[in-house]
Image (spheres, rainbow, N blue to C red):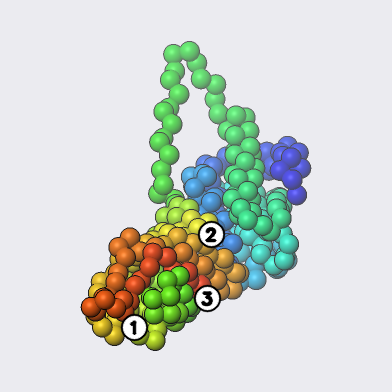
């Protein structure tokens, strides 16, 4: 439903809220480990203060309104807001958020939806914030006393990231790496594990990655940064070659495409800032080259935070 259609319902919402003004904010129900839910929470918390994440029943979006209100009312009784929102990820082509404004004897629910495509969570979070801001701004304008000439309005608080999410995720992946230089020992299979933390729109964390090929094996730690589908990082490989042992620094950039179930595919371009070679006499036994390409499949899930 477009935002303009929701704003046309403002008189009804204001009538609902005018009897008992509340501070602006919203309680956001977390119903699952869906990636879209986490992203929507991150985007909404970045765009406004007062986003309170609370656990909700797994099938909340598909229950009756009466059952939903039975869950919502006790949650709102403990908060300083009259609004609660939840995301429905069941539609294959749409993301839909419901925003409920609830008082003792009445409730109004407004629906916002966007096509399910890149950036959908951010657009939906912005529309949700605008709906909430419009309702609360009109409510405050009607309820607040006029400011006289000798009165100074209270200073606005500086924006704070205290409500920004702190979501922890862990994941495993398997894949393959192909150096572009034919003297680098050929393709290598890989296995990795990582732990990341959401800081606003960023995912930051560390990993331990291992690879093995025909004439070598390697293992080492990595630091990773992600935003949207983009990924970048650095790695230090302790490499055991047939002829030598080396510590090989690497940097990489790439993209990750996640699914609702937590599965993902990732592609990387890895660069060697220091080219590694093994030479015996006049024979070149090993040459890492400058570039390697990698693909991997994996699974991640939320392990805490929020």
Q: Nearer the viewer, mark 1 or mark 3?
A: 1
Foreground residue among 72 and 131: 131
| Count of labels in the image | 3
Residue 144, horizontal then vertical, whole percent: 55, 29
Please state which of residues 291 and 32 is positioned toward the viewer in this rendering: 291
Numbered tag placed on residue 229 in the rendering: 2
Compared with 119, 222 (above or below) is below
Mark 1 vs 2: CB contact within 8 A: no
Task: Say if 119 sits above or below 144 in the image.
Answer: below
Label 1 or label 2, whichever lies nearer to me, is 1
- Give the alpha-carbon distance from disc 1 to disc 2, as whole Å: 31 Å
Q: How far from the left and from the top, in percent, is residue 240?
A: 28, 81
Residue 276 located left or right of residue 41: left
> Mark 3 touching mark 2, by CB under 8 A?
no
Q: Residue at x 51, y 44 (%)?
A: 48
The structure residue drawn at horizontal position 48% and vertical position 78%, both measured from the top left corner, is 175
In whole angstroms, how far apart are the C-alphas of marks 3 and 2? 14 Å
Quarter of the image for residue 7 reads top right
Residue named by callout 1:
216
- Point out which mark residue 297 bears: 3
Residue 210: where, in percent of width, then height? 36, 79
* On screen, residue 42 above or below 271: above
**Sequence-wise first label, 1 or 2:** 1
- Earlier in the chain: of badge 3 and badge 2, it is 2
Q: Is residue 306 visible?
A: no
């Amino acid at each position: 439903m477009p935002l303009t259609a929701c704003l046309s319902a403002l008189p009804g919402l204001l009538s609902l809220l005018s009897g008992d003004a509340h501070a602006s904010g919203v309680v956001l129900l977390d119903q699952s480990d869906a990636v879209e839910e986490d992203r929507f929470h991150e985007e909404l918390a970045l765009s406004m203060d007062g986003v309170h994440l609370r656990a909700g029943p797994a099938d909340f979006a598909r229950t009756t309104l009466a059952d939903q209100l039975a869950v919502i009312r006790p949650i709102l009784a403990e908060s300083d807001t009259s609004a609660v929102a939840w995301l429905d990820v069941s539609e294959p082509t749409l993301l839909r958020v419901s925003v409920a404004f609830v008082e003792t004897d009445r409730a109004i629910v407004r629906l916002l939806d966007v096509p399910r495509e890149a950036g959908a969570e951010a657009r939906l979070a912005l529309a949700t914030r605008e709906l909430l801001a419009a309702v609360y701004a009109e409510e405050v304008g009607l309820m607040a006393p006029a400011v006289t000439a000798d009165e100074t309005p209270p200073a606005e608080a500086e924006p704070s990231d205290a409500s920004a999410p702190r979501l922890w995720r862990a994941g495993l992946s398997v894949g393959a790496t192909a150096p572009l230089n034919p003297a680098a020992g050929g393709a290598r299979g890989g296995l990795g594990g990582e732990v990341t933390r959401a800081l606003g729109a960023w995912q930051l964390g560390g990993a331990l990655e291992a690879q093995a090929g025909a004439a070598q094996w390697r293992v080492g730690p990595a630091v990773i940064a992600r935003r949207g589908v983009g990924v970048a990082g650095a790695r230090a490989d302790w490499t055991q070659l047939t002829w030598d042992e080396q510590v090989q620094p690497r940097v990489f950039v790439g993209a990750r495409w996640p699914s609702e179930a937590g599965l993902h595919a990732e592609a990387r371009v890895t660069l060697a800032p220091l080219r590694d070679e093994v030479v015996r006499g006049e024979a070149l036994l090993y040459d890492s080259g400058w570039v390697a390409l990698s693909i991997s499949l994996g699974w991640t899930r939320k392990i805490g935070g929020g």
